[in-house]
Amino acid sequence: MAHTGTHSQPVRSCLLLVVVSVCVQQVHGVWPLPQQLHQSADRGCLSPQRFSFTYGRDSAAQTGCSVLDAAFKRYFSIIFPDFTKGSENRLQYVWSEPQPFVVSVSVKTGGCDGYPDEDSDESYNLSVSEGQAVLRSVTVWGALRGLESFSQLVYQDDYGSYFINKTEIVDFPRFAFRGLLLDTSRHYLPLHAILKTLDAMAYSKFNVFHWHIVDDPSFPYQSRTFPDLSNKGAFHPFTHIYTQSDVMRVIEHARMRGIRVVPEFDSPGHTQSWGKGQPGLLTPCYKGGVPSGSFGPVDPTIDTTYKFMESLLKEVKFVFPDSYVHLGGDEVSFACWQSNPNVRKFMEKMGFGKDFTKLESFYMESIMNMTAALNRTSIVWQDVFDYHERIPQDTVLEIWKGEKYQAELSRMTQAGHRVLLSAPWYINHISYGQDWRNSYAVQPQNFSGTEEQKKLVIGGEVAMWGEYVDATNLTPRLWPRACAAAERLWSNEEKTLNADLAFPRLEEFRCELLRRGIQAEPLFVGHCKHEYDGL
Amino acid sequence: MSRSGSHSHRVRWWCLIVAVVAVWVQQVEGVWPLPQQLHQSADRDCLSPQRFSFTYGRDSAAQTGCSVLDAAFKRYFSIIFPDFTTLSENVLQYMWSEPQPFVVSVSVKTRGCDGYPDEDSDESYTLSVSEGQAVLRSVSVWGALRGLESLSQLVYQDDYGTYFINKTEIVDFPRFAFRGLLLDTSRHYLPLYAILKTLDAMAYSKLNVFHWHIVDDPSFPYQSRTFPDLSNKGAFHPFTHIYTQSDVIRVIEHARMRGIRVVPEFDSPGHTQSWGKGQPGLLTPCYKGSVPSGSFGPVDPTVDTTYKFMASLLKEVKFVFPDSYVHLGGDEVSFACWQSNPNVRKFMEKMGFGKDFTKLESFYMESIMNMTAALNKTSIVWQDVFDYHERPRSKYVVEVWKQGCYLCKMRRVTKAGLKVILAAPFYLDLPIPTHSWARYYNVRPLAFRGTDEQKKLVIGGEVAMWGEYVDATNLSPRLWPRACAAAERLWSNEEKTLNADLAFPRLKEFRCELLRRGIQAEPLFVGHCRHEYDGL
């Protein structure tokens, strides 16, 4: 009897392992928490040798689907980190002939070559049972989210065997816009650091990379139309720039992970570096009756400014496929405008009196109109709304000012605008201890307003401003702290109110990030099975 | 004429051209930490890796075969010429010119190449850079290491990759003998590599003591020869999260090569939860009512077995760690558990301690300090030990760590005639924004009222990187460049380094240099380095 049923024997070895390791390690679940998740204690062994992804017969996408083919490859390595390094697997060979496990992926619509956008359906269903998993989604983007969840369900015991529990997941995001801002102007971030961040974003189901690509200190974007902008405005014209091919790589890397790339060309303030390569663009400041030699915001009084902006925005539309573009509009200092006699004359002519907010609104409206004409949706910082409550209805407003963001949410949504919340997630600010709990406690729809108003909150965004951040400290400052916001933006708030309950799952997820090569800092005293080796 | 003086002319000429082109491009910002005396001229020399060499001076007590300096020459060559070792940019130079030689001659007065740096090591040196040569003189090899570090910081590259060094005269010595950095490998395990890398960076800032807070409540990663169960049962993991004897030896040797002392801390009687797992009977059983609650408190100071254990452990420590100092901890002892335990209460009565548990702690600390003294080691303890009994019966070094008026404490400790190390204002694990590095820079360790004798008892200071929220993922950017601020305070003349704004550009430059050397040092403010950290 013991030597007959050859094929079923592997199961026995699996069983043995199960018995040995029952007390050892239980997977803590998925981050961010799926909308519905049912796990049983039944588990199956996974063997990398007999593991495969396939397309379901009824799937609109089949082999040749760029996004999913690449994802299968990627997730295989993520699920079996030891296998790709070619270690630890010999034991398994000796013990048993492994059982096959097939992950069948079916999507309803094709679209493998497209880009994710604001309307992309990211929902998916995942059902894991003996020897198989079935993943169903409407779009390939939903399938990516499902693959991510699947990869988090697999775990290893102390002997290196892989397991997955029987699981049923029904999942979809709470908010369509789950963004992360990187600032590549205050410090230049090498391409590699951006790509790595996109990887980690996908692990937390973030889906928008808000690329604050230029600002006062430097202009690293190498424009086709205006090459002097980076030639003269970057920290260095060759080593500290993003070429067109760099930008394409970022966009494609993001697309492969279902991440949108929304560029920000912030004006009329925050443009000091623009002036170096585009003489005449910025307002000359005056001291007494003469130009002082320094420059202020973009000069909103002359035609050349608008011609320049139009060309630039045309290029942006051409280079960045996303339907959104961020136009900035924050923190404009009026002192320079005020000092300039031409600006004052213009103000008079336009009947703006002494109200420079009207001048800024005039400028912003012009470039928002340009953007609309290019079939793009504008995002602007809250300042633009604060100055001028009547702005084009389809403009998306982003809240960044720390205090009273609830009141701001109320007012903006009452005015019928879609809103992004960023204020409580400025995680470039650091403090001692577990500050992820603050991010986790944010309730984006907890403001006074109607159901209709609440629906206008399309999401939120983690911001990593670059005053004190570059590639040396970006990753440990982002992760796992950004994960807290990721869960808030994806998961059901009712099921994720308690940070203490989330803590062990987040701790586990942070170890998983380390395992995937993300330099995520610790949440508190403790250890991971596989520490970051610092190499 | 133009074609005759072939060799020297072409070289000098070409050098000159480069100098003219690059005169506005980049000036070296100096040396961090600032030397005691530094005179630089605008005259500069091209350096060529092909013709660059280190030699021992004829009158040097150390000659080829000196482990510390031979290795340092090799190391600093790669640091000075980062491009050369990666084999780039040098083709141009070959085509243009035949380079001039440059020789760094190193002379030390005393040998001791195989010894360890200690509290009395002389780290002074003089460095004189002139045309085609540099002369470095020091008393000890440790001083020579400091001089080589300064030399390496004098060399810079222009935009065309050419190396330069300006004519320079340096007379230098440290203000304080003890310039420490604490790593906590108990709250998080730090892989060996992270420790070695930290030692590298310490040497760049002339920090000279690695205070290894090796064990604590959360884990016991030190693999003891005498008591292997301490790490078997007390480490986060008995194989992957420990320091073997060979790991420890590697750390000590890596440190020695850089003139860095390794002072281990075995903190007791508190902070010992992890010890209890592998050493049953060591910790005090806490009581709830009249029965043991199942939890444990500090080391049990009432039983003989405790002292036997500590004596064996300290003997091993003496054997493994060559430094003459050992840190015995003694901080943050909670008395609640002792108080709950009837045997401890009985002992208190017997000893006539009344209800004063500080006396019990002092009794314990004195016992293990006596053990340490008998082993010919100097004890360092946290200030708590002094706080309890300001009239010390024996000599020990006090480390001041509590926030608040740390200068008041320095004054009291020195008044009692004890040596003191200042750590309180240098707790770098608190992640304040980088730009407040000036907070560390503005510390004035001697700004308390006291006699000169008292001030001399301040032997130095220490940067502390506690591990609650720190492991290998964020250690380097959290340490550097903020620790550099403390390093300058502890090495340089305070009078010449009072102004943080003046220091800022030099620190910024030094931070870029750290990046170039592979240290993941975070930015001080908006800006860039020519060679950014590539994150790979």
Image (cartoon, coloured by chain):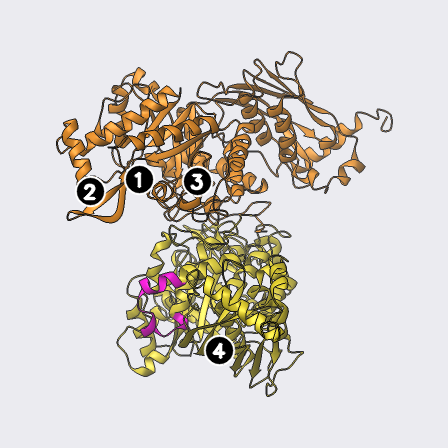
Chain colours: A orange, B yellow
In this rendered view, identify the residue nearer to me: B458 or B525. B525
Q: Is residue B101 visible?
A: no
The residue pinned by badge 4 equals B119
Rendered image: mark on residue A481: 3
Which residue is depicted at the point 36% across and 61% down?
A: B504
- Is residue A54 shown above or below A156? above
In this rendered view, identify the residue nearer to me: B187 or A83. A83
Do callouts 2 and 1 point to residues on the same chain? Answer: yes
Rendered image: mark on residue A335: 2
Considering only order in the chain, which callout, 1 or 2, is on the residue closer to the N terminus? 1
- Name the subunit of mark 1: A
Q: Residues within 10 Å of mark 1 (few under 14, many from 20)?
A: some
Q: Residues within 10 Å of mark 3 (few under 14, many from 20)?
A: many
Magenta residue check for B505: yes
Q: Amino acid at mark 1?
A: Gly
Residue A129, image x, y percentages: 64, 21
Highlighted magenta segment, given as a residue range: B490-506
Asked whether the residues under the numbered discs 2 and 4 touch, taking CB atoms below 8 Å apart as contact, a structural biologist would say no
The residue pinned by badge 1 equals A280
Disc 2 vs disc 1: which is toward the camera?
A: 1
Considering only order in the chain, which callout, 3 or 2, is on the residue closer to the N terminus? 2
Do callouts 2 and 3 point to residues on the same chain? Answer: yes
Do callouts 1 and 4 point to residues on the same chain? Answer: no
Residue B485, image x, y percentages: 39, 63
